[in-house]
Amino acid sequence: MDKYQTLKLFDYSIFTSSLDQFDINQKSKCVINTLNQYSYIIAEKDPVYKKALVESNLLLPDGIGIVGAAKILKNVRIKKIAGADLHNYLLKKFNKTGGRFFYLGSSEETLDGIRKRLSIEYPNIEVGVYSPPFKTTFSDADNAHMVMHINKFKPDVLFVGMTAPKQEKWAYAHKNVLDVNVICSIGAVFDFYSETVKRPSKFWINLGLEWFIRLLHEPNHLWRRYLLYGPVFIYLVFKEKLSLMLKGQTQLADN
């Protein structure tokens, strides 16, 4: 979207504006996704996932790796914007005037926790939820059922929490049949907000070490993301940096 500031990083246009500039009353369809070092590497091997990220209306820099890459490759300081930041922002904004939010994904337990907490903290927001079947691939009937539940509720905002890349690909495939203008893929935020999984404190987030604390708490789930893909991403960033430097020297020589 032209009205927002973005930074071209690799093949992606990263959102670098403040969330305060996001128009919550916009009439056009807006799909919001996040990019981190893990999703970048996975997308390089999954063209459908990459297409979903590239064609996002807003792509948030959700990770210290993306923030670091922007500084190393573009010499630009950007601020990390996590899915949880987007979630909190939209809740606060819509609670002032009233709104309807739908949560698609996760377990019934997690969704029940979200509903209960929202009723206390954001009483002006009406909530719809649906827990889809836990399977690798949804059938046409599964997809139709999910779309039906969402469109029947007619939300202002749809949050999809199925983990990446499943959630982004689902939103991309069905955005045109969903009766909602703002679609956000926010993954772990469902567990964070319901408190089935505790998010690291602001102290660690501000130090850029949220990933490390999450790794300590969920090593079996996250070790591959941070200990394997982390070094791979760093390698790719410096490889790109070297390529840019060599390209710059070649252009100087030609001149």
Image (cartoon, rainbow, N blue to C red):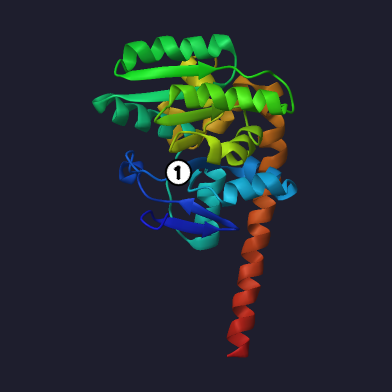
Please give the name of the residue rendered at 44% of the width and 37% of the height, measured from the top-left corner.
Answer: 182
Query: Which amino acid, mark 1?
Result: Lys
Q: How many labels, in total?
A: 1
SS for tag 1? loop
Please give the name of the residue rendered at 41% of the width and 33% of the height, measured from the top-left corner.
Answer: 85
Residue 127 in sight from this viewpoint:
yes
Please give the name of the residue rendered at 60% of the width and 58% of the height, measured from the top-left corner.
Answer: 11
* Quadrant assignment for the C terminus: bottom right
Q: Is residue 37 above or below residue 101?
A: below
Q: Nearer the viewer, residue 154 or 108?
A: 154
Q: Nearer the viewer, residue 57 or 152?
A: 152
Picture coordinates of residue 7, whole percent (x, y):
47, 58
Please give the name of the residue rendered at 72% of the width and 33% of the height, measured from the top-left corner.
Answer: 224
Residue 213 in sight from this viewpoint:
no
Picture coordinates of residue 115, whole percent (x, y):
44, 13
Which quarter of the figure has residue 26? top left
Picture coordinates of residue 229, whole percent (x, y):
70, 41
In the displayed image of the protein, which residue is found farthest to the bottom? 255
In the displayed image of the protein, which residue is found farthest to the left? 96
User: In the drawing, does residue 49 fall left or right of residue 1?
Assistant: right
Which quarter of the figure has residue 36? top right
Q: Nearer the viewer, residue 44 or 78?
A: 44
Which quarter of the figure has residue 126? top left
User: In the drawing, does residue 148 fall left or right of residue 102?
Assistant: right
Which residue is the site of mark 1?
A: 29
Picture coordinates of residue 233, whole percent (x, y):
66, 48
Mark 1 packing: few (<14 Cα in 10 Å), some, or many (20+)? some
* Quadrant assignment for the N terminus: bottom left
User: In the drawing, does residue 95 fall left or right of residue 201?
Assistant: left
